[in-house]
Amino acid sequence: MALYLKAADVLEKVEGKRGAVKTLVYESKFENVKQLFALVSETHKYSSILEEIIESTKLLKQTKLRIHLAKVLVHDLLIGKGLKCGGSFKVVMMKHRCRLEAELARMKIKRKVSRNQDLLPAGVQQSPGDQLPRYVRVNTLKTTVDDAIDYLKREGFNYLGQANRIGDLILKDKHFVMDMHLSDVLVFSPKTHFHDHFLYKAGHFILQDKASCLPAYLLNPRPGCHVIDACAAPGNKTSHLAAIMHNKGKVFAFDLDAKRMSTMSTLLLRAGVTCQQLANQDFLKVDPDGPLYKDVECILLDPSCSGSGMVCLPGNDSSDQKKSRSRLASLALFQKHCLNHAMRFPSVQRLVYSTCSIHTQENEEVVAECLQKNPGFRLVPVLPQWPERGLEPLKQCLRASTSKTYTHGFFVALLARRSKEETQNQEQVIEIINPRPEVPSVDITDDIEEKTVTAATEEPSISDEEMVGTEDQSVPSVVGHSDIMVTKKKRKRRKKVIEIINPRPEVPSVDITDDIEEKTVTAATEEPSISDEEMVETEDQSASVEGHSDIMVTKKKRKRRKKKKPTKVE
């Protein structure tokens, strides 16, 4: 009964992409590890078939079982060697046995197959993860590579030396070699198990895929420096960093998951790491300018990703990838935030970005966009002999795959801060490629004088408003320039130019006194035809105009002049 409960818990974590089957099984600390591993692995393989049978028979509704517990029970009842338990679980399953077996038979007839394994998809029948070599990283904090090789020889393993080409990693039986790229990594045949081995339990061996060893190896922090492992759990890369630094310096390890941090603490203790400083904290909330991180020189960033490169995890076929576009977009956005945040640390000189994903959206596109926003960093070419490179134009990056490197799918990029000279040269290159447009210097005074001469020699053919518009159109491109400021004197000079071009019409000066006297003499010799009040009004209007330079003649005066024609005085 305990076997099925524990298998259901591990299966739930595996299908939730929280780790590989083997790792989760050994972390469960179940007594019979091999029995648990076999049950979880086989149930996981037939997961889609079992789920279809459970849904067709409505088993969950009738038994109140959890889906993952129902899967492991149905597997052993129909596909395995029978139930290995008694009690209530066996009673429930035997009650529904006939319906479950009938549904399995109906499924075989429908798909025209006779064996249970023929029900599996073609890609699941032979998983590529079963064909990958077993990689073991020697923990140099506790032993040396030579001592580990000697120990294995005494146990009956056959050492073939260091591999020279990728084909040398295909091994059988108890043969093993040293990797051609990473000297602290040993390679064994696919079905070699070390979870129960003394060297693993003592922390001398770290069971880690070769591709997963690349980030710390490429970052290569010097002993004594300060390093950040941004998304550290479960801790294999953190222990690798500590080994490269010989436990000298400080490794700040961050992770938001408290349970994973607890597992990581146990792993680091077993590996003999003493230079770590663990923090159950979100890396994005860490202050780059904080006094604790002012000396951080190197950062290893392996953020959460889709896990599409892990062949041991489910859901990596093309149909699942099409359904997860929105999830990929959100993951890529998170990864960009993390990488941009890592570049903000003032003293960082080297930075590694890695994912266990095969999607360009999480790999090259993230790096390219962050480099564009942070021109102070550049890509560093690494491992020129590596068989698989990043996609164009980021050939400096590394990719890994089951077919070309015999590892899980992986992506790694090494970035370095530019020196002051490199930054200046980069700016000069940008200026050469995209030069700034030169603005010709214009002498506004000469331009205005030239227009003045032209306007004085020619008759004006445009109005004042048109001339002002012409002036405004000919100068603003120069006036707006930061190097030329038009002063008040130049504005006044412009107004004078307008007055010269279109002078105001002159109003003829009229002698009011003569006009009044003439009207008085005429009125004295003739009989008055207007009243005294009208005459007084005329005199008052004339007197009010006398003090102004401009004379406005009213309508009454114009009419009066037409009616009264002056007679000669004898």
Image: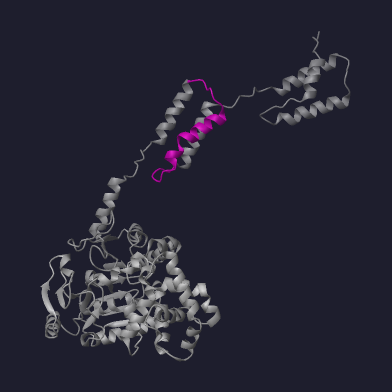
In the image, residue 87 above or below residue 328 = below
- Viewer-proximal residue among 43 and 179: 43
Q: Residue furthest top?
A: 570
In-image side of 52 versus 229 (left or right)? right
In-image side of 502 versus 300 (left or right)? right
Q: Is residue 466 magenta?
A: yes
- Viewer-proximal residue among 420 and 443: 420
In the image, residue 478 above or below residue 257 = above
Q: Residue furthest bottom?
A: 87
- Viewer-proximal residue among 40 and 14: 40
Give the image location of residue 320, x and y in percent. Answer: 41, 64
* Residue 443 visible to the viewer: yes
Quadrant containing the N terminus in the rendered view: bottom left
* Residue 344 visible to the viewer: no
- Viewer-proximal residue among 125 and 414: 125
Tally of numbered discs:
0
Give the image location of residue 42, x and y in percent. Answer: 36, 77
In-image side of 376 versus 545 (left or right)? left
- Quadrant of residue 23 within the rendered picture: bottom left
Q: Which residues are magenta?
A: 458-485
Give the image location of residue 167, x and y in percent. Answer: 16, 65
- Quadrant of residue 126 within the rendered picture: bottom left
Q: Is residue 167 magenta?
A: no
Give the image location of residue 44, x and y in percent. Answer: 38, 75
Colour pattern:
one colour
Quadrant containing the C terminus in the rendered view: top right
